[in-house]
Structure formats: C-alpha cells, structure tokens
Image (tube, rainbow, N blue to C red):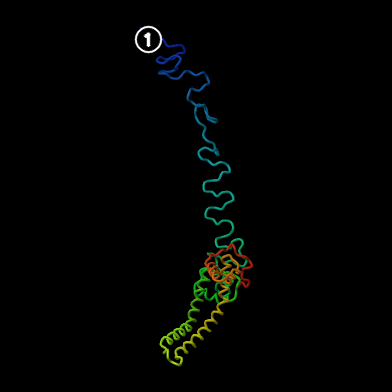
C-alpha cells in the first residue's frame, strides 16, 4: 500500500509531485497558481514609468531622483534669496561706518576711520578713540570751553590724569609751607614772647601756595566741565547731568560713575555735535 499519489500520476493541470495539489503549483510547496494577469504573492506591480519585462526606466534629466535639484530650489552653499553671500558685508555699509541715528557731522566711531584735521592731526570736532596721554592733554587745552562734541574714554581719563598731575605740582608750595609751620610750632618755646621765624615764613609760603592752587583750579574748572560734558555725550547722555554736582555728597559720585560708561554711538543726537567741524 502506498500513501499519496504515485509519481507517475500527476494531478490535473500538469503540476509536479511533492506538494502538488491545491497548495502549490511548483515543487516543494510553491505558492498556488495565480490567474492570468495577477502578480504572484509578495511581488509588487511595476512602478509607473517602468519598462516591460521588469526593467526600470532610467531617470530623465531634471527628475527628482538621485539628488537632482528641483526647479527653483536653492543649491547647496548658495545664498538664500535676498541675502548676501557668506563673508560678504551685510547691507547697511561696511564695518566702522556711523550707524543710523548718529549725528551728520560725527563720523568717528570706535574701530572706524578717524577724520583728520587741517594740520594732519585728528580733527578736534571728532572724538579720538585710542588717544595717547599727550594727545588727550593737547586736545584738553585746545578744546578749552567746547561743551559740544564727544570725548572717548581714553581722552577723558588721560586728560584727567594730566589735571591731577598739574594740581599736585601746584600744591607742592602749599604743603611745604604747612610743614614749615608744623616744624616751627613743635620746637617753639612755650614761654617765648615772640613768634618763631619759621612759623612766619611757613605761613607766607602757605598763603602763596594757596593762592596759586586756587588760580590753577579755577583755570582748569571750565575745560574739566567741558570734557565731562563731551564724555556724557559720548556715553549717550545729556550734558545737563552735570547739574548733579549741585547735589551734596552723592552728586559728584554719580557724575564719576557716568564717566566710566562706554561709548554709545546709536544714542548720539545732532544737537550734541561740534559745529566748528575742525
């Protein structure tokens, strides 16, 4: 007795042995036979545009396959529409140009070109950024009573140092006379009926030194206030803040804090510019 169909007795349809029948059309359990025009199970129908026989149609020029660009799409590394190429200066001018809102006659800004005067030196009507001690001192006296314009941090603090040195030198006679009076009073006989000569000479030196110090201080008062007014303009504040000196004790400290503030070009106003333009 045999089990199953004999090898010489294939089923109808001409199918082979071992798995023939309703569960396979080929050997060893191949899939069932498909009707005409239907794809076998697991195979996808041909894509649109493919050629007969399973061969894919090669991509045409301009098609989105293989990374080809679409029409109107930006290329890799190309600038965006309306923008500037990488590394090119942005719209609005080169670096160092005066920003919008700056005074029309004030073109000098930190890091920008310096306007020169008639003598080949930096223009007095413009702030000098990166000024040396000699430049700041010279400009301090040349711009004696100019409350308009601007003064950089270097202009102000180098000139401030020059004023401090001048004041210290002028006050030397006053301190010498003071020392003479103290020394004479320490060695004076308490029972003496006459004044020691050292006290009288020291008093005279003190009086001369005091008068000299007062005159120099008054002479430096106007250019010092003018320098501070220009420094306030450079920091973006009105020169009227100098009225804080009238406030006892704290007023001078507030003005001193203003002198440390950095340059603020965008806050400049045309009425603060130096009208001389030299």
Q: Based on the displayed image, in which of its 4 quarters is residue 246 positioned? A: bottom right
Q: Is residue 143 above or below residue 31?
A: below
Choose top left, top right, bottom left or bottom right for residue 180.
Answer: bottom left
Farthest bottom residue in view: 193
Please state the horizontal and vertical placement of residue 155, each as a whole percent of the image.
53, 71
Residue at image position (51%, 40%) is: 67
Q: Does residue 201 appear left or right of residue 149 in this picture? A: left
Q: Furthest residue to the top?
A: 1
Q: Nearer the viewer, residue 139 or 34?
A: 139
As helix, strand or loop, the secondary structure at mark 1 comes to loop
Question: Does residue 176 lie above or below 63 as drawn?
Answer: below
Number of disc labels? 1
Q: Position of residue 10 (x, y in %)?
A: 42, 11
Who's the residue at 52% across and 21% down the image?
38
248 or 95, nearer to the observer: 248
Relative to residue 14, is residue 106 depicted above or below?
below
- Across and down, in percent, residue 254 comes to 54, 68
Q: Quadrant of residue 244?
A: bottom right
| Circle 1 crowding by C-alpha within 10 Å: few under 14, some 14–19, many from 20 | few
Q: Quadrant of the N terminus?
A: top left
Which residue is identified by label 1?
3
- The quadrant of the image that shows the C terminus is bottom right
Of 218 and 120, which appears nearest the observer?
218
Image coords of residue 252 (percent x, y): 54, 71
Q: Residue at x 63, y 71 (%)?
A: 275
């Amino acid at each position: 007795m045999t089990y199953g169909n004999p090898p010489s007795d294939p089923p109808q349809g001409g199918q082979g042995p071992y798995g023939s029948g309703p569960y396979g059309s080929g050997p060893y359990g191949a899939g069932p036979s498909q009707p005409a025009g239907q794809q076998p199970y697991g195979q996808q129908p041909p894509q649109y545009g493919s050629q007969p026989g399973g061969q894919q149609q090669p991509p045409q020029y301009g098609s989105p396959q293989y990374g080809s660009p679409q029409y109107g799409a930006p290329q890799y590394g190309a600038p965006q529409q309306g923008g500037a190429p990488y590394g090119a200066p942005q719209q609005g001018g080169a670096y160092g140009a005066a920003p919008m809102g700056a005074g029309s006659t004030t073109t000098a800004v930190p890091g920008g070109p310096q306007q020169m005067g008639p003598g080949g030196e930096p223009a007095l009507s413009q702030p000098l950024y990166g000024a040396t001690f000699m430049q700041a001192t010279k400009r301090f006296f040349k711009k004696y009573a100019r409350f308009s314009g601007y003064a950089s941090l270097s202009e102000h603090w180098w000139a401030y140092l020059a004023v401090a040195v001048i004041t210290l030198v002028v006050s030397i006679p006053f301190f010498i006379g003071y020392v003479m009076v103290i020394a004479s009073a320490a060695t004076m006989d308490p029972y003496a009926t006459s004044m020691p000569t050292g006290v009288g000479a020291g008093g005279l030196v003190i009086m001369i030194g005091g008068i000299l110090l007062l005159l120099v201080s008054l002479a430096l008062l106007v250019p010092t206030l003018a320098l501070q007014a220009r420094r306030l303009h450079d920091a973006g504040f009105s020169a009227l803040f100098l009225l804080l000196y009238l406030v006892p004790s704290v007023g001078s400290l507030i003005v001193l804090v203003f002198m440390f503030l950095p340059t603020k070009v965008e806050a400049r106003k045309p009425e603060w510019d130096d009208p001389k333009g030299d």
